[in-house]
Amino acid sequence: MINADLVMYEDEFEKIDGELKKLCQQANAKITFLVDKNGQLIASAGDTHDIDTTALASLTAGNIAATGGIARLLGEKEFSILFHEGEKDNIHISIIAQRVILVIIYDQRSSLGLVRLRVKKTSEILTGIFEDMIRKAEEEKDSGLNESPFAEISDEDIDNLFR
Amino acid sequence: MSFINYSSREINCKIVYYGPGLCGKTTNLQFIFKRTNPNQKGKLISLATETERTLFFDFLPLALGDIKGFKVRFHLYTVPGQVFYAASRKLILKGVDGVVFVSDSQIERMEANIESLEDLKINLAEQGYDLDRLPFIIQHNKRDLPNVAPISEMNNILNTNGVPWFEAIATQGTGVFETLKNIGKQVLIELKKSY
């Protein structure tokens, strides 16, 4: 299940997006975002204009992967929470449903305690959403009713991309 | 493991450049970065040591265009080639959609090539992948150097399954985009098959 393609549809995206916005507000954070463990950005909320979220996503996943490697060396399953403190900004990273990474960037207007409290609540909701999403993707794949646009990709489409 | 987002209409695929130390993986990405339209690329992130050896990975996101209304993005990664970074290399293969093996054509590096290819197979297997079933190509790099092994010998030793291969001089860009195009195509064809 962990190795399945991640497929996200409109309604799940909206739910996730809504949760991230709510978390950003309630935790008094600057930015909240969600990354696939492979480094792909899923959704983000808050003041992301000046930030390269693609790079941030990839580095966060690298960070989690490296920490996970350390955890396994020590006989831990994973370190589910990481926290980095800076002069102005701090970053709180946690793993959700064992496959996605929730990141919160905040400054002195918030606190670690508040962030942790809000993250806990959001994590539970997001876990539910992702479990539904994976189940749905599997069901559709099994039923063969998946009307994926990719089934109709022609060699010409692919060639055009690389012209 | 590609990520398909119906909401933002994007497909994201991960391609990893693998190979022995100093074979030119980072050079491939640097050339692609240099020659790509600014609106098609993100920042090239390099986690390197002070002597510019890759410590963890290089990362370059590319947005090539649309297929059936979906934005196609390739995330290119390199691994650290040096033998003692084995643990890091393993991590980067997570969720890979396609692999480019960059070999160093110099005769004295043949053993390092073989060792790295074996390492790739082992690390993929640990993540539950089989190299024979993954989009995979080989780039024989550094063809401009004087002491290179003949291309037939390179293929005999490294390309026993007869996967697509390219000759390259990554410092000059020769073969770099040909390699990228081929692996990109293979990844998309694989994606098409799985639906």
Image (cartoon, coloured by chain):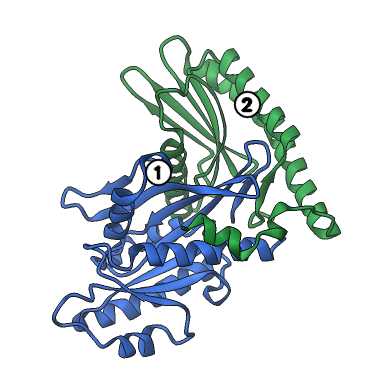
Chain colours: A green, B blue
- Residue B97 visible in the shown view: no
Which mark, residue A120?
2
Q: Position of residue A157 (x, y in %)?
A: 59, 58
Q: Amino acid at mark 1?
A: Lys
On the picture, is B192 further left or further right than B51?
A: right
Residue ID at (30%, 86%): B151
Nearer mark to the viewer, of 2 and 1: 1
Q: Position of residue A124 (x, y in %)?
A: 69, 31
Label 2, label 1: how far apart the Cα atoms are: 35 Å
Which mark, residue A134?
none
In front of the other: B26 or A16: B26
Chain bearing tag 2 is A
- Binning the other alpha carbons within 10 Å of mark 2 as few (below 14), some (14 to 19) or many (20 upward) gives few
- Binning the other alpha carbons within 10 Å of mark 1 as few (below 14), some (14 to 19) or many (20 upward) gives many
Q: Which residue is mark 1?
A: B41
Classify mark 2: helix, strand or loop.
helix
Classify mark 1: helix, strand or loop.
loop
Residue sitting at the far top: A109
Chain bearing tag 1 is B
Residue ID at (40%, 23%): A50
| Vertical arrangement, residue B109 with respect to residue B66, above or below | below
Q: Amino acid at mark 2?
A: Lys
Residue ID at (67%, 30%): A16
